[in-house]
Image: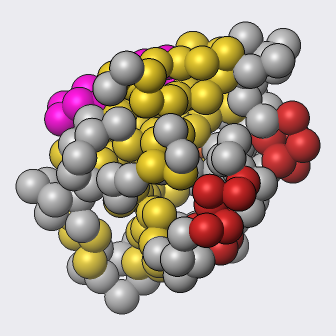
Amino acid sequence: MEIEPDCSISVNLASGLMSGRRVGEIVRTLADLAGIFADEQARRSMPQEQPVYRVQSYTPVEEGVNGGLFWGVTFLYPGRVGDEYFMTKGHFHTIRNRAEYYVTVNGFGALILMEEDGSTRLDWMMPGTVHYIPGHTAHRVANTGSTTLSFLACWPSDAGHDYGVIAEHGFGGRVMCVNNAPALVPQS
Ligand SMILES: [Fe+2]
């Protein structure tokens, strides 16, 4: 179903923060991210209510509609679980060929991209970088800086989120702090 676009939606280009009555929001805490980080014992020892990231989204059409676009912003807080930087859950799109744009607003991080064969690479994120995420590519973001990393996103309304493959197999690499610097550490 097509919904009338709401012109009262706005985005603060300095912070990425969206406002408007049709803006939805979710927060992911450490409790929500069980099994995501390499050091599960470290994750369990931290305050479970601690937010790791917050996502605002604007969905002017129903989820699953072919031909529409969604818009969002993610605020990924600085921190680590053991030596691994705070990161998003990561997903493939349910319709695998659907692409997405990310645009970094503030902070520093790594966009972790994985092909369907498991090969994994990084795109470094800094204010102003534009990232085209092709179809058939899982994506996850790690905050490698000491301030909040915020990035805008635009994706097709029928893309969907498939978290299952990632929950089961993870990515082919993790962004860890190695000798005081972020590095992609391959995972077998
Ligand atoms: Fe996505």
Magenta: main secondary structure equals strand
Q: Position of residue 182 (x, y in %)?
A: 39, 24
Q: Residue at x 61, y 34 (%)?
A: 139
Q: Nearer the viewer, residue 179 or 174?
A: 179
Quarter-wise, where is residue 28 in the image? bottom right
- Left or right of 155? Residue 18 is left
Q: Is residue 65 left or right of residue 46?
A: right
Give the quarter of the image for residue 71.
bottom left
Whether residue 16 is visible, yes or no, is yes
Q: Can residue 32 be found in the magenta stretch?
A: no
**Image spot of residue 26 (x, y percent):** 52, 75
Q: Looking at the picture, tell me which residue is in the foreground, 94 or 125.
A: 125
Residue lying at the far bottom in this picture: please name it: 21
85 w.r.t. 13: above or below: above
**Residue pictured at 69% horizontal, 41% vertical:** 38
Which stretch did the figure color magenta? 122-134
| Residue 33 as seen in the image, left or right of residue 77 | right
Where 177 sits versus 1, above or below? above
Q: Quadrant of ligand 1?
A: top right
Q: Is the residue 134 above or below the residue 103 in the image?
A: above
Name the residue at 9% across, 55% down.
Answer: 14
**Residue 74's spot in the image, x, y percent?**
40, 57
Q: Residue at x 50, y 38 (%)?
A: 83
Q: Please identify the quadrant where the N terminus is shown.
A: bottom right
**In this image, 96 relative to 132: left or right?**
right
**Of 119 and 21, the residue lying toward us:** 119
Is-magenta flag for residue 127? Answer: yes
Q: Position of residue 134 (x, y in %)?
A: 60, 22
Q: Quadrant of residue 101?
A: top left
Where, quadrant-wise, is the C terminus in this rendering?
top right
Q: Is residue 101 something that shows in the picture?
A: no
